[in-house]
Amino acid sequence: MNRTIDMFPHYRCDSSHPTRWFKGIRYMKTLVLVISVIGLMFGSPGYGHPVSNNSNKLSDESLLTLVQKQTFKFFWDGAEPRSGMAQERYHVNGMYPRNDKNMVATGGSGFGLMAILVGIERNFVSRQAAVERFERIVGFLEKADRFHGAWPHWLNGNTGRTVPFSSKDDGADLVETTYLIQGLLAVRQYFANGNEAEKNLAGRIDALWREVEWDWFTRDNQNVLYWHWSPNFGWEKNHRVRGYNECLITYVLAAASPTHTIPAEVYHEGWARSGKIVRETEPGGLSLSLKHNNSAEYGGPLFWAHYSYLGLDPRGLKDKYADYWRHNKNHTLLNRKYCVENPLNYKGYGKDCWGLTASYSVKGYAAHSPARDIGVISPTAALSSFPYTPEYSMQALKHFYYDLGKKIWGPFGFYDAFSEQENWYPQRYLAIDQGPIIIMIENHRSALIWDLFMSCPEVRLGLRKLGF
């Protein structure tokens, strides 16, 4: 593989670099919709009806590549045309719950950046085309709304202005910014020693990273980070980022910042709750090392084992609170174990059909977990767990593709969620669920994104600072 993971020097930002556009992009969504309908009608080989005939089944490696390639299209063909950013959601039937045609997700776009790197390595897209897309995205981010260096949860991809996430959430979202920075740093490392244009791109990314004021989000030097700040409502959301959930990476990057770092005490007292994050475990059992927020013994939704670890390599990652590889693996195994046991007797659950996480559901968007189970399986849960449970994740993948593919496979890979219990198979996608599929499958196969992100010298310094 031709990725660059050398140590990164200090770059200067060149905000005058032109944003590139390509002709006819505004028709892309229409074309994808037409292709989707044709595929559903005629079973086109691109993504149509997966075959169940044993003689036509793919090798495991070929199937993984197919899933990655199809999922990659969400971030490439399905991107918001003007900005190049990832759409928050995509509905094949074109029916959306709100007027969000141009709405893009900052966190989901961070996942998309890493997905495009996978696309380069797997020859889904050329390096030059990817650079042009990255330049467009970075140019958009340089001009988009930011608040003390942090972006909001949603942006209008046409204007760069904030789209409120809720009534008082119309400003900075530190956690979504974290996911975006995680992706940007992986891109920076990939192109750090490239040609002149690539080095310029890396430098512009470095400037964006340095401008995030992580320390400001301690809200007057408290020993905890705050999730939101609004120019209209200040700190009224009052949401402190405490563990354990999906936000470990936020504290790692805050500690790693070369310009606006936080003291280690913010991590230990805020995130780790002065040690109260730890819970008792049984030797040799599958108990979790850390207390999951608002969750029962089987743990929270599986995205908690994914989002922070798309770039942050959990293999060998330890501090005084947990062995994060062991913790994430047990979390995954417990989630599967619950689905196999199926205490609520939902149709379809079993050893090859498992995975509870945040996704669309029969009751709107919901964070599914063993403690909040309403009969909805989300393919991203099992597929993004490939590094932790490769055998079980492959079982689920084959079942999803060969047995359920006619119902849950579409133009951008597997649809977001389904319920056999409710005979519910919506043709919908979410950026934050599609991204981890392609990224974590690649980390399982080659450790590409882990190697890139962990090559950041600041990240290594930040981890040491926090006691990893």
Image (tube, rainbow, N blue to C red):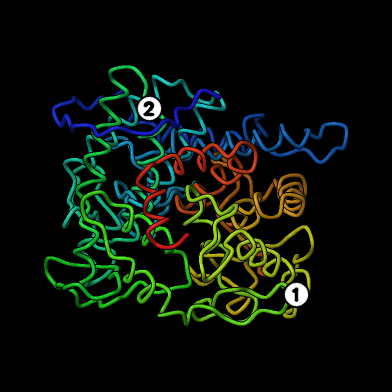
Dot 2 alpha-carbon crowd within 10 angstroms: few under 14, some 14 to 19, many 20 or more: many
**Seen from this angle, which residue lies furthest top?**
195
Between residue 358 and residue 420, name the one nearer to us: 358
Q: Position of residue 414 (x, y in %)?
A: 60, 47
Between residue 258 and residue 411, name the one nearer to us: 258
Between residue 209 and residue 257, name the one nearer to us: 257
**Seen from this angle, which residue lies furthest right?**
55
Q: Position of residue 347 (x, y in %)?
A: 75, 69
In the picture, the quarter occupied by the N terminus is: top right
Q: Are marks 2 and 1 in contact (CB under 8 Å)?
A: no
At horizontal 56% and vertical 70% (from top left) the residue drawn is: 368
Q: Secondary structure at mark 1?
A: loop
At horizontal 36% and vertical 31% (from top left) the residue drawn is: 27
Quadrant for residue 389, please give it. Answer: bottom right
Amino acid carrying label 1: it is Asn
Which residue position holds label 1?
342
Which residue position holds label 2?
191
Which of the labelled discs sits on residue 118, or is there none? none
Side (left or right) of 355 relative to 201: right
At horizontal 23% and vertical 76% (from top left) the residue drawn is: 222
Between residue 359 and residue 116, name the one nearer to us: 116
Q: Secondary structure at mark 2?
A: helix
Q: Position of residue 306 (x, y in %)?
A: 53, 56
Q: Position of residue 64 (x, y in %)?
A: 67, 38
How many circles with numbers are drawn on the protein?
2
Amino acid carrying label 2: it is Phe
Q: Earlier in the sequence, mark 2 or mark 1?
A: 2
Dot 1 alpha-carbon crowd within 10 angstroms: few under 14, some 14 to 19, many 20 or more: some
CA–CA distance in space, label 2 to label 1:
47 Å
- Nearest-to-viewer mark from 2 and 1: 2
Q: Is residue 174 above or below residue 405?
A: below
